[in-house]
Image (tube, rainbow, N blue to C red):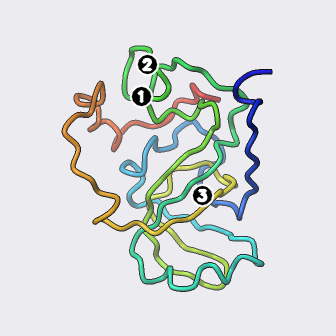
Amino acid sequence: MSIIEKDAIIFHPIGHIRSPFDKPEGMPIQPAGAKDIEGHIELYAPLEEGLKDLDGFSHIILLYHFHGNSEFSLKVTPFMDTEERGVFSTRAPRRPNMIGMSTVELLSIEGNVLKIRGVDVLDKTPLIDIKPYVAKFDAVPATRFGWLEENAEKSESLKSDGRFV
């Protein structure tokens, strides 16, 4: 039994993220590269009541499952680099728990459907949770960016080449 299996935690999707991307190749690699890309969230109808008051926020944080991956790697060569890095120092999807996170703009809520902009995920991505983005809490000043110091600008222009499928 591996450490990953030992203390299992089970999450169930609360809905799905819909996007124009039906395959990883050519997708933006971060929300910064998907500024104008619109999509929507189809929240499961029984959970609609949980959306109360969310429309007062301009941005939301999405936690989701990288459903296009079936295995993880502890070392990966990220999109914004040519050198192999430890997976925890990257945003690569091939992670032990395959959890992704994106901050997107919330355009509107109609029933159990949330229209969003800045979507950088595969179509039909299982959504695990939604949290309101609050700059006072979530935008903390950082002083170091590790290996990304020289590469972060690439997030706006690089597209996925399918290396993590």
Quarter of the view holding residue 155: top left
The residue lying at 52 percent from left, 17 percent from top is 75
> Residues at badges 3 and 2 in contact (C-beta under 8 Å)?
no
Task: Give above or below for 33 relative to 61.
Answer: above
Total marks placed: 3
- Residue matched to label 3: 19
For label 3, count other residues whose C-alpha is less than 10 Å away and answer few (under 14), some (14-19) or many (20+). Answer: many
The residue lying at 28 percent from left, 27 percent from top is 146
> Residues at badges 1 and 2 in contact (C-beta under 8 Å)?
yes
- Residue matched to label 1: 89
For label 1, count other residues whose C-alpha is less than 10 Å away and answer few (under 14), some (14-19) or many (20+). Answer: some
Q: Quadrant of the N terminus?
A: top right
Q: Amino acid at mark 1?
A: Ser
Tell me: 11 left or right of 140: right
Q: Amino acid at mark 2?
A: Arg
Quarter of the view holding residue 47: bottom right
* Front-most of residues 31 and 58: 58
Task: Give above or below for 144 relative to 53.
Answer: above
Nearer the observer: mark 3 or 1; the answer is: 1
Q: Which mark is residue 77?
A: none
3D distance between C-alphas at marks 1 and 2:
7 Å
The residue lying at 30 percent from left, 65 percent from top is 135
Q: Amino acid at mark 3?
A: Ser
Estimate the x, y position of residue 109 in percent, counting from the top left: 56, 81
Quarter of the view holding residue 20: bottom right
**What secondary structure is found at the residue carrying circle 2?**
strand
The residue lying at 51 percent from left, 50 percent from top is 101
- Residue matched to label 2: 85
